Amino acid sequence: MPERTRVVKIKLPLANAYVLAGNCTVLVDTGAPGDHARIVAALAREGIAPRDIALILLTHGHGDHAGSARALRALTGAPVALHVADVDMVRRGRNRSLSATRWTARILRPFVDKPFEAFEPDICFEDESSLASFGGHGMPGRVIHTPGHTAGSVSVLVEDVAIAGDVMMGGHLGGEIWPVQPRLHYFAEDRIALRQSIARLIALVPRTWYVGHGGPVTMADVERVFG
Ligand SMILES: [Zn+2]
Ligand SMILES: [Zn+2]
């Protein structure tokens, strides 16, 4: 029987990164610029060496998730995969303009909208796919296109769990307050697409949603807030 995938949350100063450890190990997101050492230290606490990482998957191209991708690719030797619709951001090392969903987001924007080290992703994908097809052999997860926060946002479904990036967030101020309460993210490029992506994920019934800030949130709470 295949080994059950273990999900490890790595809480970084701005965002979360995740490790999916099963028959092979995938890093989902890389934090902001300068977070690579924190991620390597968190991996070490789990008994995972940088070279054990088979794939780095980015949920989207914002600097608080893609900011240490270049450094972590050098440390792990793993290819970096990103949806084609967000590639322009990582090539420039700049976010597209962050459109705020409420006034508090406008106040936060200058603190989170920072440049990062530009890079060329190794795998630019457009179609939904299994993680195994990106070189994560033995990894049962699949990538679902969940646009709205950005055009190239994706989520990973592994067994009964979703790694949903910034499709929503947990709590306020990066999860410092009520981290398990699902909330509309501070920023969204397309709010209609975002609602559709959340509805689509709900229909896929993940029990636990691991999000980019705060969390995890439960399916019951997501349905209560967004259903
Ligand atoms: Zn984002
Ligand atoms: Zn984020």
Image (cartoon, rainbow, N blue to C red):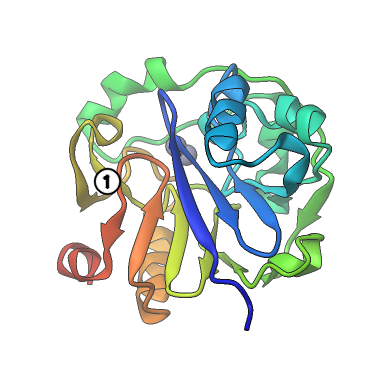
107 to the left or right of 52: left
Secondary structure at badge 1 equals: strand
Residue visible at 67% across and 53% down in the picture: 25
Answer whether residue 195 is visible to the viewer in this image: no
In this rendering, is residue 27 above or below 13?
below
Most foreground residue, 98 or 183: 183
Mark 1, other Cα within 10 Å: few <14 / some 14–19 / many ≥20 = many
Quarter of the rendering occupied by the N terminus: bottom right
| Quarter holding residue 96 | top right
Task: Please state the total of marks drawn on the protein image.
Answer: 1
Q: Residue furthest front?
A: 47
33 to the left or right of 51: left
Residue visible at 81% across and 28% down in the picture: 74
Residue visible at 70% across and 37% down in the picture: 49
Quarter of the rendering occupied by the C terminus: bottom left
Most foreground residue, 178 or 151: 178
In x, y percent, where is residue 193?
44, 62
54 to the left or right of 26: right
The residue wearing badge 1 is 170
In x, y percent, where is residue 165?
47, 49
Answer whether residue 32 is visible to the viewer in this image: yes
In x, y percent, where is residue 191?
37, 54
Residue visible at 23% across and 49% down in the picture: 183
In this rendering, is residue 154 above or below 49?
below
In x, y percent, where is residue 68?
64, 26
Most foreground residue, 27 or 189: 27
126 to the left or right of 100: right
Give the residue type at disc 1: Gly
* Label 1 beta carbon less than 8 Å to ligand 2: no
